[in-house]
Image: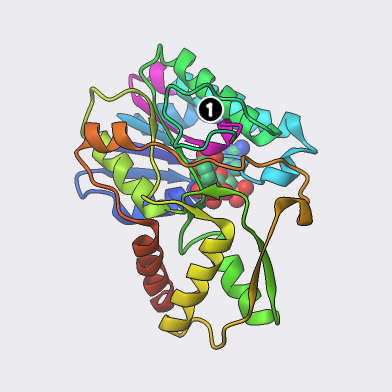
């Protein structure tokens, strides 16, 4: 199967490339090779590649910065997703789109199902929700949309790598404890998307993250414990739990964004791994890989 992947410089795309089954022929395009806001470039890329599957891993992901440039964010996350989905449909290719737990307001106290009403709190979440609709409309509801959250990988910028750096540089850290979700290794997402690639009947929205629940504070403490164990950190610095009000950010974030993975696990016949086991494995890999 020929697969075109956009946003090839990002975390999700890097894991898609690492985990692709051998029967997949990948065409991986970074932003400089394919800007999904450029209609002519999208048409040309699809005409040249003639893929059977398009995976949109491109997105504007700077959640705080998004608040000050909504047009740019929507151009990528909403219009760009729709444009790519339309081109995929016209080329007869399936379309996979990655979305986010930030489509929810976070006022539930139990995991969000695919059928729960979205109500994004900020520009980024609004643009991603609009991208879901654009992808569904452009593909007559045949697109597969996978919502995930709190992604990290050895490649790219993320909370895990930021925490390792800050814990090495600073005498102490404050980390918010009143936002709860599930840290998700981008590898889990990538492997799930490849599993879905061999299931042509799958369509619609699915929730997918690693298993378990954590606050950012819990996640930071786990990164420290695993980092010390693996020798990625030399000393333990005190980490203090603080509330979001003590750490104001331009974008509001959901207080609770745990996703219910029942449907994805059932329909794909997979069993989720706990986020802590995935974190350990990713850090082991980070220890052996060149800076990325
Ligand atoms: N990161 C998270 O915690 C998280 C959580 C939930 C859902 N998601 C979703 O998961 C997906 C993958 O996220 P990720 O963490 O892999 O993001 P990422 O590491 O930020 O990668 C996104 C990639 O998209 C590229 N891009 C931006 N604008 C583009 C454009 N106009 N045309 C083509 N490419 C463009 C970026 O290129 P540049 O680097 O050159 O800008 C970057 O390489 C996204 O849909 C995101 O919304 C992410």
Q: How is the image coloured?
A: rainbow
Find ligand 1 in the image and state its quadrant: top right
Q: Residues within 10 Å of mark 1 (few under 14, many from 20)?
A: many
Front residue (pair 70, 221):
221
Q: Does the magenta run of residues contain 92?
A: yes
For the N terminus, the quadrant is top left
Please report the residue visible at 49 percent of the width from the left and 28 percent of the height from the top: 44
Q: Is residue 30 above or below residue 206?
A: below
Q: Which residue is mark 1?
A: 81
Please report the residue visible at 51 percent of the width from the left and 24 percent of the height from the top: 132
Q: Which residues are magenta?
A: 88-106
Side of 228 relative to 40 (left or right): left
Q: Secondary structure at mark 1?
A: helix
Q: Is residue 186 above or below residue 47?
A: below
Q: Does the magenta run of residues contain 44?
A: no
Side of 166 relative to 223 (left or right): right
Q: Is residue 143 above or below residue 17?
A: above
The spot of residue 228 in percent (x, y) is 48, 82
Side of 291 relative to 289 (left or right): right
The spot of residue 162 in percent (x, y) is 61, 66
Please report the residue visible at 48 percent of the width from the left and 21 percent of the height from the top: 135
The spot of residue 198 in percent (x, y) is 21, 34
């Amino acid at each position: 199967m020929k697969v075109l992947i956009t946003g090839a410089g990002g975390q999700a795309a890097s894991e898609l490339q690492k985990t692709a089954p051998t029967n997949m022929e990948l065409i991986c395009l970074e932003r400089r090779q394919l800007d999904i806001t450029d209609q002519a470039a999208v048409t040309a890329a699809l005409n040249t590649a003639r893929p059977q599957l398009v995976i949109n891993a491109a997105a504007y992901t700077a959640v705080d910065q998004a608040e000050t440039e909504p047009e740019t964010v929507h151009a990528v996350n909403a219009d760009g997703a729709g444009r790519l989905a339309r081109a995929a449909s016209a080329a007869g290719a399936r379309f996979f789109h990655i979305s986010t737990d930030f489509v929810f307001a976070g006022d539930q106290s139990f995991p969000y199902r695919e059928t729960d009403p979205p109500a994004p709190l900020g520009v980024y979440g609004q643009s991603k929700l609009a991208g879901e609709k654009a992808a569904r409309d452009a593909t007559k509801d045949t697109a597969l949309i996978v919502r995930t959250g709190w992604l990290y990988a050895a490649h790219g910028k993320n909370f895990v790598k930021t925490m390792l750096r800050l814990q090495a540089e600073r005498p102490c850290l404050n980390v918010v404890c009143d936002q709860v979700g599930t840290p998700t290794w981008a590898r889990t997402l990538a492997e799930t998307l490849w599993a879905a690639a061999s299931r042509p009947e799958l369509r619609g929205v699915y929730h997918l993250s690693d298993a378990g629940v954590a606050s950012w504070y819990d996640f930071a403490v786990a990164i420290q414990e695993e980092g010390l164990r693996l020798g990625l950190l030399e000393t333990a610095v005190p980490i203090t739990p603080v509330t979001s009000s003590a750490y104001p950010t331009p974008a509001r974030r959901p207080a609770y964004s745990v996703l219910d993975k029942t449907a994805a696990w059932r329909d794909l016949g997979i069993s989720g791994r706990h986020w802590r086991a995935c974190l350990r494995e990713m850090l082991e890999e980070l220890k052996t890989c060149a800076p990325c």
